[in-house]
Image (tube, rainbow, N blue to C red):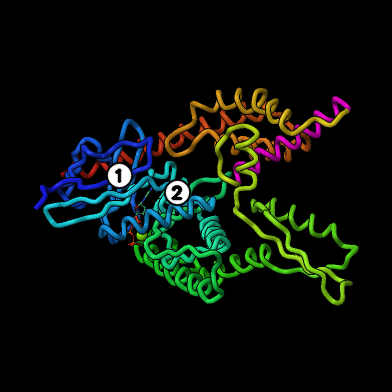
Amino acid sequence: MSAAGLLTSHLRPGHPDFLDLPWQHSLANWDDTFPRIESLPVGDSRHAVRFVNYEGRLYALKELPPDLAQKEYSVLREMEELGLPVVHPIGYIRTETHDGPCGVLVTRYLDRSLPYQLIFQSGRLERYRDHLLDAMAILLVQLHLSGVFWGDCSLNNTLFRRDAGALQAYFVDAETSEVQPSIAEGMREHDLEITEENVYGALLDLQAQGTLDANFPVPDVGRYLRERYDRLWDEVCREEIISREEGYRIQERVRSLNALGFSVDEVELATTEGGSMLSYRVLVTDRNFHRNQLATLTGIDAEEGQARQMINEIQEMRATLSQKRNRSVPLSATAFHWLTQLFTPISAQLEKLSSEDVGLVELYCELLEHKWYLSENAAGDVGHESALKDYLRVKEARTEEDHTEEDRREDHTEAPTEED
Ligand SMILES: Nc1ncnc2c1ncn2[C@@H]1O[C@H](COP(=O)(O)OP(=O)(O)OP(=O)(O)O)[C@@H](O)[C@H]1O
Ligand SMILES: [Mg+2]
């Protein structure tokens, strides 16, 4: 019999070998004081999940039966290759612990992610609650478009990241998932039913704990999710019949799907009714339209909503520059100008506000939102400089308030201890 410890590992290059972890024990029995272990918020799960820190890079380890770890790794890789928002799979490990053989799935910890409980528990995250169900419906549409059946869509199996004031949902748990070239109608329906039931249950639990307001209309949540999902699915997948003179409507449809973030790969066109009419469908590849565009133009890695805001700003800048120079300025040249004249210098000033929770790109989007709000009130563009000044002032005042509130709460919690 082999000694307890790590037996084999399959890991993508550029990551640690994880050999120094206490593999002779199952993850649930790892000592919390072990130097690499990080305590971070974690959703409810059947399997033990641990987070480890290698020189500031965080990884999530999930213990599973050996074959399932390998299977989940393969599914996550396939999904990642399809451009879906999933946790980044690093590999799988087989171990022999004192409790028997184990498999471990290794993924990169999804930085700046919020488990849903935190969104409901923290007063500061209140503004994101309304976006939670939208983000889930969008994620389900994204998966189904790529032929993925989830099989266990729930709030616990989803992580949320801030995305220009809204949320982007990330897929975490692929244990029950299957990737096919396309998904059957019945499977989509099944996934929706599972989602409705799971989300309903999770929100009822939050209500029972007093975390979610008793007036929150939990019974309506399923209907809302389904409506949101159906509308989006129809928007992307419906077949349209147009006359031969209405070809421009195809371009309009592609543009409106791009505006929703979907990248259109092909348009399928067929003549019908003896050739007098055309029927067409668009084939969508992923929901990374602006993300890809921004990354190509500037190298910035952003969520889709953040990227859309920044691309819109670059487009506006392009129009202004073209007008000023009396010639069409290419988007790539404008993007360079935007990067050097706006994004980089402003980011340098926002840096002090950036934290493990909120990154620079999200702060920049908040600033754009603030500028828009000030300009609305002033009935004219207030400009970046004055918006930034005001934004920093508001943020500093809010931080001050938060500190006062924390001090007040500490005084409050210390009081009974003193009395004890
Ligand atoms: N890469 C990651 N980054 C951040 N958090 C993660 C990551 N992987 C897992 N988690 C956290 O661990 C929790 C449990 O993971 P997961 O859902 O995969 O476990 P599970 O035991 O398979 O769940 P279930 O009980 O639904 O089968 C997630 O809800 C999430 O909070
Ligand atoms: Mg899970």
| Quadrant of the rendered image containing residue 412 | top left
What is the x, y in percent for residue 279?
Answer: 78, 69
Find disc 1 in the rendering and name its residue.
Answer: 51
**What's the amino acid at mark 2?**
Gly
Marks 1 and 2, how far apart in space? 26 Å
Crowd class of label 1 (few under 14; some 14 to 19; many from 20; radius 10 Å): many
- Answer left or right for 23 relative to 397: left
Does the numbered disc 2 mark a residue whose Cβ is under 8 Å from ligand 1?
no
**What's the amino acid at mark 1?**
Phe
Foreground pick, 80 / 272: 272
| Quadrant of the rendered image containing residue 348 | top right
Image: 258 above or below 207: above
| Residue at x-position 60% and y-position 42% | 306
- Helix, strand or loop status at disc 2: helix
Find disc 2 in the rendering and name its residue.
Answer: 123
Query: Which label's residue is closer to the chain start, 1 or 2?
Result: 1
Does the numbered disc 1 mark a residue whose Cβ is under 8 Å from ligand 1?
yes
- Specify the segment rendered in magenta: 305-326
SS assignment for the magenta stretch, majority: helix
